[in-house]
Image (cartoon, rainbow, N blue to C red):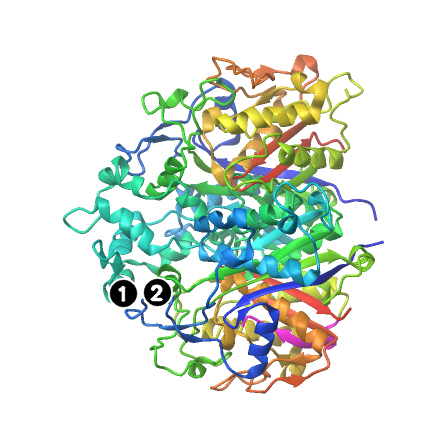
Amino acid sequence: MGQRRIVITGMGWVTPLGTTLEGVWSRLLNGDSGIGPVTHFDASTFVTNFAAQAPPIDLAEYLDDPTPFSAAARNSRFALAAASMALRQASFKPHDMAKPSRAGMYLGSGEGPHDFSHYAAMQMAGWNPETRTIDSGVWASTAQRRMEPHHEHEQEPNMALSHLAHAFGFRGPAYNCMTACAASTQAIGEAFEILKRGDADVMLAGGTHSMIHPLGMTGFIRLTAMSKRSDSPKTAARPFDKNRDGFVMGEGAGMLVLEDLEHAKARGATPLAEIAGFGSSADAFRITDIQPDGRGAQATMRQALKQAGIDPREPGPDGRPGVHYISAHGTGTQENDAIETAAVKGVFGPMAPKIPFSSVKSMLGHLIQAAGAVELMTCVMAIKTGIVPPTMNLSEPDPECDLDYVPNAARDLNPQGGVEVCLSNSFGFGGQNDTAVVRRFRG
Amino acid sequence: MSRRVVITGIGLVTGYGIGKDAAWAGLCSGATAITPIDAFDASGFSCRLGAQVKNFSAKDFVPKHYRKAVKVMARDIEIAVGAAHIAVADAGLITRAALGEDAQSGMTYPSERMGCHIGAGLISAETPELAAALSTSKSADGEVDIRQWGATGMNNLPPLWMLKYLPNMLACHVTILHGCEGPSNTITCQDASGLLSIGESARVIERDAADLCFSGGAESRISMMGMSRMIVSGRLADAPHDADPLAFARPYDDASPGGLPGEAGGILILEEESAAASRGAKMHARLLGFGAAQSGPPSVPPLAKDQTIPSDGLRYAIEAALDSARCTPEEIDAIFPLAACVPWMDRAEGEALREVFGDRLASIELATLSPQLGQNLAGDGAVRVGIAAMCIEQQMLPARLHSGKASVGLHAGPAPARAAQLRKVLVCTSSNGGQNAALVLGAV
């Protein structure tokens, strides 16, 4: 039996720049910013009081019957909307399969947001600041009064899977992973592997997350990982710029229908692109820092390229590099952008300066667990249109970041022969690194 | 030639203590590990019994230079770190932990050939730490003043506060300590997390992306938030501190008042068989098959007392596991299920087992471990696989506790530890949320 080929047959996203494939894509090519003041809660006194918020989602626009999901958390609502769009584009319904256990899901969904006012009041109940002890009876009775069962379940990271199974009928292998900012690239990669070994014929893969809530913002503010340019949020996300001062929090979802090529052909589906390679590694270095030489990032890129059959240091038959566009992890933190640049140089050598390498986080913010899926989708759109999106707000070059970041304006690569192969990087806090390679589908 | 996967190291941290021998002795003794909870003041809680790991700190299992990092480990992380250390010793491996931070050589396997897949739960932040910080922003009506919190209050949390509770920090610390630079993942599907992680490790080894994986899961539910969340889910019995823990040993019993909480972790060393053989490793058991599937709705509580959740996903997962093991249901000698003692969960599990095994189910030994170890969610799958591997090695089953009446057709009544012929066994777990995983283990 020959190696199974895995194609993407549908995509859907919910992003700070909108929810339609073409609409968001044209705004990205335009260099629009999805960043503005936080309105989900009163963040006025937070040192970072801005973020990239997604538009409100009315599930009635996406589902025949939205009523079972009326209490679904924000991340699950994003997932339902994005999955609905992806399945529609793929013209695929798991319910219609003879064996619904052949359609699975692999998500990198984050946890649902805390119900902050109840959660906070409950945590403090019975606290005696003098003795620094908690009155167990007061605490427990407050907890039972202020905890709402549905809301507690909605915080569980596996609930997006449950809702998608309910809405669409997936009964195959179902996983959720949480490897921070690498999660949805990892989910797509592992879904690809599940399909390759034949444990399913179709996998919905992607990620969904919102950390735009008081404790989510608190956590990153305490880590000093976020930009503090509260006076100019629209230009706060400055990947690869010398004056970058951290990432900007975003929220959203990206969902892809991955499918065994033969299965897609048999039902007449149109492949949008082919997944050509996946790599995964761990830094095994420090809980807060990246390997200074980007060793983990290099390893994951090399694995993915090897699987795709691409030699990164040699030009292809057309004289161009073997990869035509790299979607950077590009968070806008001092450490990530310099080390990712070094890692790309380490892998691609003399080819590195010739490859457009941009970060859409300059416009969308950082969708955390959803970032990798949305960014891989931008790669598919680049293949489709031949145009690559810019890195915005890149006004002062950093000597440590000296590659071609497609600064401040999208670039049309059609005159050079368009975009055939893209690589997308995602690196998580805690050292998980994941890379996916996608290629134009050719039968 | 396909690559086969064996278990060469078992690291268990359970209510019976530290290590697989403590767990084995405890499980065979016929006593339960469940005691009154004293890890925090539980006097106000409706449930006051649980399986605690006593006298345990990850400090005892990390090199000296790493002891400071234990401060940023939630209990779940500490348990994983401890279990990983024990698993490495059991497997006779040399990893970075034994060689020092900057070791370049001397490890049994090169870093890039070692992967790590550790399932984790939604780790609960420690209440006293949050209470102390939040109360600095308390307004007159007892609520948090969000503006004060934003302006000054949050500065009372330590800078690395969030890192203590990120689910991927179990794998993060383990990969740093042991120098695993291969594929690494954190699966978060509640009770199914551990088995899903072991399944993924096995696939990673089979596809030649690694030769060895640290694999399993850990979770502590012995905390104010951890227990409260289970209480609102209807998973915990009302259990006063002076109640007899054995009264709650009622798997597959519709009259069970609910289960009890626990804390536990299991980290296994999975290894490619020929590589394990060539270094002369002791092999505890072989992984023969794995399957995963999703159930239909409704998959979460709260449910009416007699409501049933679907069993379709668990049946698919078991069928897929048997299929990938090229094994028929008739070949399974024993089953290690979740058996949470929560009626609506146990009903679905029993139903799936009946659908797969038919009338023969009544004669297949069930090894129910929750009455001894409590409910440990992400920790439960790997603990069961570790125990199942030991059972295969010893050709013996642990004691089974039951103080009620298991539903008809299930071999789950009380029994002492006993010899048993165990060639192939099934381990399976299902989550609240409908994810299911099943694994077939066999003798080497």
Q: Position of residue A408 (x, y in %)?
A: 50, 15
Residue name at image x 40 percent, y 68 percent: B303
Q: Position of residue A8 (x, y in %)?
A: 65, 38
In the drawing, what numbered circle is on residue A314? none
Q: Nearer the viewer, residue A187 or B423?
A: B423
Q: Nearer the viewer, residue A247 or B390?
A: B390
Say which quadrant the N terminus of chain B sits in.
bottom right
- A287 is within the stretch colored magenta: no
Where does residue A26 sit, x and y in percent of width and height?
51, 22
Residue shown at 65% from the left, 66% from the top = B318
Mark 1 vs 2: CB contact within 8 A: yes
Snapshot quadrant of residue A308: top right
Side (left or right) of A169 relative to B363:
left
- Residues drawn in magenta: B328-338
For the residues labelled 1 and 2, the Cα–Cα distance comes to: 9 Å
Instruction: Inspect the image, locate mark 2, and give the three-letter code of the amino acid beneath it.
Output: Phe
Q: Residues within 10 Å of mark 2 (few under 14, many from 20)?
A: few
Q: What's under tag 1, amino acid-wise?
A: Ser
Q: Residue at x 59, y 84 (%)?
A: B409
- Point 44% across, 48% down: residue: B72
Q: Which residue is mark 1?
A: A136
Element at label 2: loop
Which residue position is annotated with label 2? B40
User: Left of B150 or right of it: where is B385?
Assistant: right
Q: Quadrant of the C terminus of chain B?
A: bottom right
